[in-house]
Image (cartoon, grey):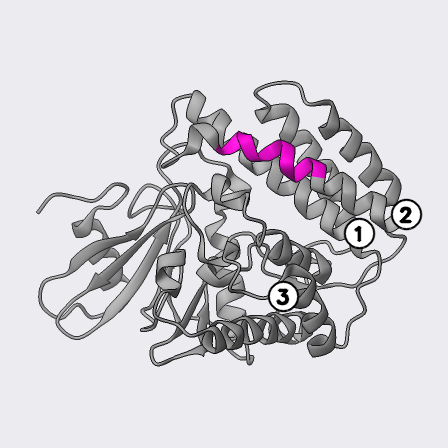
Amino acid sequence: MSELPGMNREALERFLRGNGIEVDGELSVEMISGGRSNLTYKAYDDSSTWVVRRPPTSGLTPSAHDMAREWAVTEALASTDVPVATTVAFDRDGSALGAPMTVVEFVPGRVVRSREDLGDLTDAQVTENAAELVRVLARLHAVDPDAVGLGSFGRPDGFVSRQVATWARQWERVKTRDLPDVERLHRALEAAVPAGSASSIVHGDYRVDNTILAVDDVGSVAAVVDWEMSTLGDPLTDVALMCIYRQPVFDAVLGADAAWTSDRYPSAADLAQHYAVESGRELHDWGFYLALANFKLGVIGEGITYRALSGSDTGAGAGKAAEATGEFVAAGLRALAGATD
């Protein structure tokens, strides 16, 4: 049996047994997903199934593949009404696979990634799925971090200001050409940072394909996954990013026809309004948050192409991801201009 990239089946079995997890019969491992995100595998024996995640084997951005962060928030949220997979074991120092690794129980269900995955759903089901996604996000933002042991999970004070600075620095690291509008957007964001903002647990990458839907009901989320970007911060950054992911140009960043960019889902404006009603939270300074989300995605698209040009394997279409950067930056400038008109 040949090994999968980033995986050593025998080492994984030793790790499971060493953590008191019984392996019944032969352990098998299959790749679920890889590419630009953490590598995800399904491991199973004759009686149990688990999901194993570890960082990619190349092109690492440590903060974007933080397994300790993912483990901590998933374990903490088990006691809340936010659906997550049950945690099993954590290899913090990477002794088994050469990189930190999490193991959680396998959650059966449906993952909607591409527009093709929406093909057998009615419009009513797609609408209800969007409504459920917003409900779950509102529930996440309502969790008291201190009550679940996440009071020191991040630094919410000054969060949005640091986000502006972080993504500006990242642009300088990954830019493949000069784009004057990026600097314009950066300076405009610096000038528009809200004087105060709310604080909550934020997911950092929330959209339909980072959830597992119930087997027979796409209007029910069985588990929210991919928590490696989570922290304590401004909940409106989560909402704005969810909305900006709806732009068709996001397909160029993913290198695929994403389900979440389908025009069958409600518009970004409708999603934001639904969140405001569901959460009871006002969307203050909304133009700023939309602009920040656009800035972030523009830099991410550029970074994907930068890594592809540097020889890292970042998946299909990586060389063209930066073509989306200009559109995101222009959208960010428009969002800020609209907020100040």
Q: Which mark is residue 287?
A: 1
Residue under the point 72% across and 69% down: 273
Q: Position of residue 232 (x, y in %)?
A: 67, 59
**To which residue does mark 3 refer?**
150
Asked which secondary structure carries label 3, the reply is loop
Residue 85, percent from left and from top: 41, 71
Residue position for label 2: 340
Q: Nearer the viewer, residue 279 or 94?
A: 279
Q: Main secondary structure of the magenta part?
A: helix
Q: Which residue type does callout 3 highlight?
A: Leu
Q: Could you classify mark 1 by the number of other residues whose Cα lies within 10 Å: few (under 14), some (14-19), or many (20 or more)?
A: many
Q: Is residue 156 above or below residue 303?
A: below
Instruction: Evaluate if marks 1 and 2 touch, with contact meaning CB atoms under 8 Å apart.
Output: yes
128 vs 111, left or right, is: right
Q: Position of residue 278 (x, y in %)?
A: 69, 78
Could you tell me residue 209's position as x and y percent? 44, 59
Of mark 3 and mark 2, the one earlier in the sequence is 3
Whether tag 3 and tag 2 are in contact, CB under 8 A, the answer is no
Local crowd size for mark 3, using a 10 Å CA cut-off: few (<14), some (14–19), many (≥20): some
Q: Is residue 273 magenta?
A: no
- The numbered mark, 1 or 2, whose residue comes first in the sequence reads 1
As helix, strand or loop, the secondary structure at mark 1 comes to: helix
Start and end of the magenta stretch? 321-330
